[in-house]
Amino acid sequence: MDEATAVLFPDSFEESALGLVPRGWRYVSLRDVVSIFDSKRVPLAGQDRAKRQGPYPYYGAAALMDSVDDYLFDGIYLLTGEDGSVADENGFPITQYVWGKIWVNNHAHVLRSVGINDVVLENFLTMIDISSYITGAAPPKLTLDNLKGIKVPTPSEPLEQQKIADCLSSLDELIAAQARKVDAPKTQKKGLMQQLFPREGETQPRLRFPEFRDAGEWAQKTLGEVVEVASGQVDPTQPPYCDFPQIGSENIESDSGKIVDVKSAREKGVISGNYAFDENDVLYSKIRP
């Protein structure tokens, strides 16, 4: 273990109300170390956001959902899900570390650190099982009072907090650098797609493989001519559908299209009819763009 890592691990522990903690640390309620700005949140329906497109990120309970023409918050904040996407399958809270000018809807609690390093708090929360703080099942909910009561461990020494934050931030930077390497071919692919498909108002792509350069124009068809739209819903409260993964627009990651935070219909408490699909189907949101 190198010296920089070794300083993160104390050589002695002591008992606390919630078990062993490093000597000199203490457990405090979340209400003691954050300011909460839930009263400033404002939800915008999908059709309203469509009319208000702009440069400011619009966040929901678990992810960036859209961009709008105004903002409600300006600074560094930690978002935690209030209802719906509250915790993962292990009971750890769904959190988002955000900064700058942003808009947040009423499905995420908005926190700002005041008595603890914000990087330390974010990482602590991702390791705390909050299952006992969650109420309800349709959908699950983390109420404001229960949020305030969550216990978090804190080093009493600000210097120790800062050392932990610096160590974790350096790892985050390494992860971000690796992500940029992955993003580079994604950007290349997007650029290539713009050349391989006809642009709006055109009938031929600008880049064609040699054997197809004299193949003529592409045919233009409506979506209804090339796809079959699913009809007939199933009851998500009945077997086997209650144990199938239930996918909503909040489970589809922006840009990548990856399915995230998957839970069964039973776990999410879904009671209204849903469409059944398989791995070869394409999902298209009817509500959120």
Image (cartoon, rainbow, N blue to C red):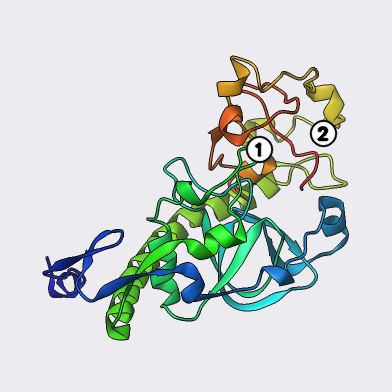
Residue 202 as seen in the image, left or right of residue 126: right
Residue lying at 56% horizontally and 42% vertically, measured from the top left: 258
Q: Which residue is mark 1?
A: 138
Which of labels 1 and 2 is toward the front?
1
Residue 11 as seen in the image, left or right of residue 197: left
Q: Nearer the viewer, residue 241 or 68?
A: 241
Residue lying at 19% horizontally and 72% vertically, measured from the top left: 23
Residue lying at 54% horizontally and 48% vertically, measured from the top left: 134
Circles 1 and 2: CB atoms closer than 8 Å: no
Q: Nearer the viewer, residue 14 or 257?
A: 14
Give residue 49's position: percent from left, percent from top.
82, 58
Q: Residues within 10 Å of mark 1 (few under 14, many from 20)?
A: some
Query: Dot 2 lies on which element?
Result: loop
Q: Which residue is mark 2?
A: 217
Query: Dot 1 lies on which element?
Result: loop
Inter-mark Cα distance, 1 to 2: 51 Å
Height in image: 236 above or below 75? above
Residue 71 as seen in the image, left or right of residue 238: right
Height in image: 181 above or below 253? below
Q: Indicate the amino acid at tag 1.
A: Ala
Q: Nearer the viewer, residue 183 or 25?
A: 25
Which quarter of the rendering shows the N terminus? bottom left
Q: Earlier in the sequence, mark 1 or mark 2?
A: 1
Q: Indicate the amino acid at tag 2.
A: Glu
**What is the number of callouts on the image?**
2
